[in-house]
Image (cartoon, coloured by chain):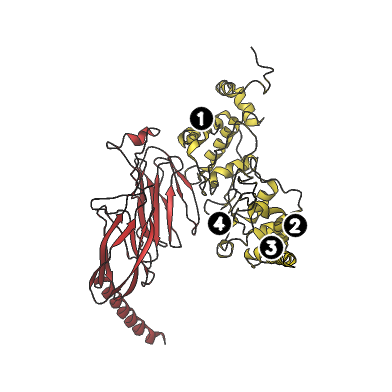
Amino acid sequence: MRVKLIPITAAATLILSVGLLHARAGGGTVSGKVTYEGTPAKAKAIDMSKEPSCAKQHTTPITTETVVTGPNNSLGNVVVYISAGAPDDAPPSQAAKFEQKGCQYLPHVLVFQVNQPLEVVNDDQTSHNIHPLPKVNREWNKSQPPGSPAIVDKYDKPEFIPVKCNVHPWMHGNFAVMKNSHYAVSGDDGGFKLPNLPPGKYTVTAWHESYGEQSQEVTISGSEAKTVNFVFKAKPY
Amino acid sequence: MRKTNMKSTRVFLAVVMMSVLPAFAHAQQMESHIGKWTGHSDSGKQLYFRYCWGCHGYRGDGNGENWLPTGSYAAQPYLNIQPRNFASATFKCRSTPTGTLPTDQDLFNAISRGFVMTNMPSWIALTDQQRADLVAFIKTFSPRWKNDKAGDPITVPPEPKLTVESIKHGQELFQKLECWKCHGSEGRGDGPSASTLTDSNDQPIRPYNFAVGSRFKCGSTNQDLYKIFMTGVDGTPMPSFADVVKPEEAWDLVHFLRTLQVAHKSPELALWESNKEGAEQIESRKLYGTPTGSGVKQ
């Protein structure tokens, strides 16, 4: 019985993995640009004088990153992802790294998958407390003085989670916890690209921390490349 | 005729509201286990809708009418701190690590103790069984109690002997861990970040002022104080220091924090006062005089 099972299992595994590899390597691409219309809020200057060890790390003035724009109304820091149509993916084993440097969060929006390790490091000469504020996942709040080891954690449900440091009120970032591996964050030019999409019907969703979420349907056949653009209504406050 | 109709409609509506609204709070049954007591949510429900819902609300979300008044004369909340939202299942006073659910005993202690400097009184007047029943009912407001287990309580090692060195080391930690950023260098809750603090509901919140009292939000013993900074006060800016403070160091910090409570006689304060450096520090922190001005040297 056992002898018979092995070749069958092996064959099945082979077919399955070839199938998966095929889907991963080829497939279609969804790309596009995120822009805004209207007047976005002006980035505000951040005064770090209360934290001299951070202030001296910056030669140029630091501003808030709640709305990051580029030329031609392009909108950065938008998470574009497949919200429906794609199966849930197993998380990568590599940790997503969230860095505290110069009393800022790098990156401002960190995207990772459900159950993927999250690693929070403090490069500063001051204590930070990392306080993500989830509604669906569990809320924790940990202190991280200079030189302490990375805080490692994970989230078991998809969610957009604001992150703050209570000691330094200007520090504000976001975790985006995804169900699958099809996601991208728009650059300052608003551009994004979701490669390796197997043929199928998908819902592509764009999320911005101040302007909310919007979705579009897209159907991919073969290895075609489709363009999907998003336009957010900017609020002047 | 019409009037009677309206009246009966109103009565009918009231009856419907009274029977339907509490049903929102999940029909599921929960139990709590505190020592020899076993609490039952169906008994706790009766108590909750008698004693608790005015502040904590029908849905246990902290939006009771004392927080969100609806009457024409009451535009402002009656309470200054929003009551706990049981639906979020985030609790301040735990013996368990940050981000985990508290034990039944933790919730039982919170109900029994009340919360100092808030509108939550001590419910010691209810019997142990009644408080255990309430704990069970509170757990029906969030599905998290079904899906997750309570965290494992942290280990609090026996308190070492109190020494001047221990207090001094605690003071170094207070500096190094930057406790003073919020609590202030003298523990008066007036650090540089204090005025910017908000809790997880975006409500302003004050850091604890050690100089005014003897009790903490989560108890009054040295053990309670140990647990507060080793588990964090979830839902507030107070983080957990469990990953960065060793157990023996934690006791040093406890000993030092007690000396910041200048209005509270403690062995720690007495010992610190007997030390030259300590005596100078305490002297400079003491407040003299009375509200009427008598006893103030002119």
Asked which secondary structure carries label 2, the reply is helix
Query: Which amino acid type corresponds to the residue marked 3 in the rendered image?
Result: Ser
| Distance CA(mark 1)–CA(mark 4) | 34 Å
Q: Which residue is mark 3?
A: B41
Mark 3 or 1, closer to the camera: 3
Chain B as rendered: colour: yellow
What's the chain of the residue with tag 3?
Answer: B
Q: Nearer the viewer, residue B153 or A113?
A: A113
- Choose mark 2 or mark 3, whichever is in front: 3
Q: Residue under circle 1? A: B185
Q: Nearer the viewer, residue B224 or A132?
A: A132
Q: Earlier in the sequence, mark 3 or mark 1?
A: 3
Q: Identify the residue position indicated by label 2 in the image.
A: B129
> Which chain is painted in red?
A
Indicate the position of residue B273 as horizontal and vertical percent values. Answer: 61, 24
Amino acid type for the residue under numbered disc 4: Ser
Task: Have a look at marks 2 and 1 and say if they share a chain.
Answer: yes
Q: Which amino acid, mark 1?
A: Ser
Q: Secondary structure at mark 3?
A: helix
Q: Along the horizontal axis of the image, is B116 left or right of A84?
A: right
